[in-house]
Image: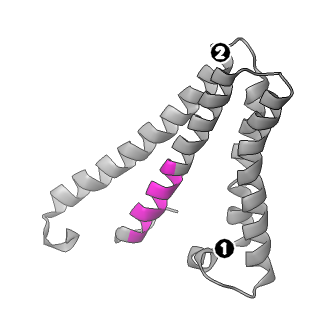
Amino acid sequence: MMGNLPGHLRTCLHTGKLALLAILVSGGIVLQILACALYNNWWPMLTVIMYVLLPMPLLFFSGSDASSLLSESDNGWVNATKFLTGASAVGSIAIPAILKHAGVIGWGALAMELSSYFVFVLAIMCCIRMNDDDDYSFL
């Protein structure tokens, strides 16, 4: 489909896709900060630790073969990567839930934290989808 388009139109579409990713990530960051600033409680910023730790196993252990993460594998490093990434993803949801259960944050902050998480997940899924569709790879 993209092969039939002129070069300048393909470049414009690639730029638009990257702009969409930037908008999604910026929206997630804004929701994260608003969850803290609106309720004058900065404890929800603990989830930022998990957001930073989340891509680390993928960067360190998966190497250039990211497709192996989506398939069955007997490789110990790939399995460790899947486990650590899953633990970080669960931690990103668990930290706000634990803070709410302990009475540290309110329902509004919890809702903004979880919506920030889902916006980040949407951005990651769009990035993976764009990486699979394009002729070039930026991951």
Q: In front here: 66 or 121?
A: 121
Residue at image position (78%, 33%) is 46
Horizontal arrangement in the rendering, residue 29 relative to residue 56 (left or right): left
Q: How many marks?
A: 2
Residue at image position (57%, 32%) is 29
x, y percentage for residue 72?
A: 65, 84
Asked whether residue 64 appears in the rendered view, the answer is no
Q: Which residues are magenta?
A: 122-132
To which residue does mark 1 refer?
A: 63
> How crowded is the residue under tag 2: few (<14 C-alpha within 10 Å), some, or many (20+)?
few
Asked whether the beta carbons under mark 2 and mark 1 sit within 8 Å of each other, the answer is no
Asked whether residue 83 appears in the rendered view, the answer is yes
Q: Find the residue positioned furthest to the bottom.
A: 74
x, y percentage for residue 119?
A: 52, 42
Front of the two marks 2 and 1: 2
Q: In front here: 53 or 121?
A: 121
Q: Find the residue positioned furthest to the right.
A: 102
Kindly identify which numbered label has been placed on residue 37: 2
Residue 73 position (above or below residue 14) = below
Residue 25 position (above or below residue 6) = above
x, y percentage for residue 67?
A: 56, 77
Chain-order first, disc 2 or disc 1: 2
> How crowded is the residue under tag 1: few (<14 C-alpha within 10 Å), some, or many (20+)?
few
Residue 58 position (above or below residue 108) = below
Q: Secondary structure at mark 1?
A: loop
Horizontal arrangement in the rendering, residue 97 relative to residue 125 (left or right): right
Q: Quadrant of the N terminus?
A: bottom left
